Image (cartoon, rainbow, N blue to C red):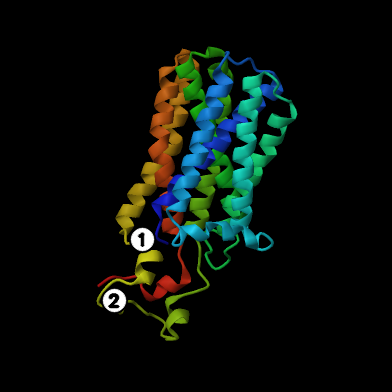
Amino acid sequence: MHPAFSILFFTTLAGAAQGLVVLLALCVLLGVPLQPGFLPMALVVAGLLLIAGLGASFLHLGRKERAWRAVLMWRTSWMSREVIVLPAFIGLVALWWFSVQLGEAPRWLPLLLVPAALALWYCTAMIYACLRFIEEWAHPLTVVNFILIGLSSGLVLGCALAALAGDADLARVASPWALAATLVAWFTRHLTLRRNAGLRHRSTLQSATGIRAERLVQKSMGMSAGAFNTREFFHGASQLALKNIRLAFIGLCFMLPALLLVWAMASQTTLPLLLAALVQAPGLIAERWFFFAQARHPQSLYYQVVS
């Protein structure tokens, strides 16, 4: 599949914001002390990330003035459900911020935001996991990875914000949570990569063309210029580029942040927490790009080679 950068930014920004909100909610519910002013500041960051992600998603629409129609198919479409849950989640975050500013934050708000974040992750992931004809996505690990990677990025971001705000207690408490989420996300993403590498697709070049030859090799995409199919369903990257991007996102998204978090916990310093967030940010984009690029749409069997 051809990754649209608007979707890459939406899923990574929104996912990190959800993880950050979950961290804040857990801190409040578990009684973790927060520095005065940190909670409203972090909620503003989460809200800005959510709004930026929502804005990025609009860039992917062909007829933006018809975006409101997406909610009409909520009975059958996971995208419609996401369109409903996302504004509701943003509204809850805004309500929490206002109630904190007024000094009357009800306890049910953070309690509600945790399942709301999980619901949003689930809706976003199911947009892809429900597509049975794209076998790389049609698996429960797709949902698991969306949740865990979003949680990891949000916790790492929360640690970095705590370091910037000088909240040493929160950084000390949240660092082990961020490390655990990052390591588990790394493990489940590895399982997905291993599964997808061993896939034997039901659709083959033979079934796509109707030619029953035992050995069939495509030499050309069958046209002299690009078309909608070649732009939207084929990324155009070489196998070497895919391999390098895979290594890059494993290192930037999981390995280096985990090592930096260990360094921060061992040295009780805040610089590694800032570095972990900075390193992980491009890794998240690379991971999500690879998620789309690795997916093999059956129709691309006709256009998989550009002569």
- Mark 1, residues whose alpha carbon is within 10 Å: few (<14), some, or many (≥20)? many
Q: Residue at x 57, y 23 (%)?
A: 40
Q: Residue 235 appears in which quarter of the rendering?
A: bottom left
The amino acid type of the residue labelled 1 equals: His
Which secondary structure lies at badge 1? Answer: loop
The answer to whether residue 129 shows anywhere in this view is no
The residue indicated by pointer 2 is 220
Task: Quadrant for the C terminus, please.
Answer: bottom left
- From the viewer's perspective, is the residue at label 1 or at label 2 nearer? 1
Circle 2 Cα neighbour tier, 10 Å, few/some/many (<14 / 14–19 / ≥20): few
| Nearer to the camera, 212 or 207 | 207
The spot of residue 59 in percent (x, y) is 42, 53
Q: Count the numbered circles shown.
A: 2
Q: Quadrant of the N terminus?
A: bottom left
Q: Is residue 49 above or below residue 9?
A: above
Q: Is residue 181 above or below residue 220?
A: above
**Residue 35 on image: x %, y %:** 57, 13
Query: Where is residue 151 drawn, in percent x and y?
Result: 56, 36
Location of mark 1 (residue): 235
The answer to whether the residue labelled 1 contacts the one labelled 2, judged by CB atoms less than 8 Å apart, is no
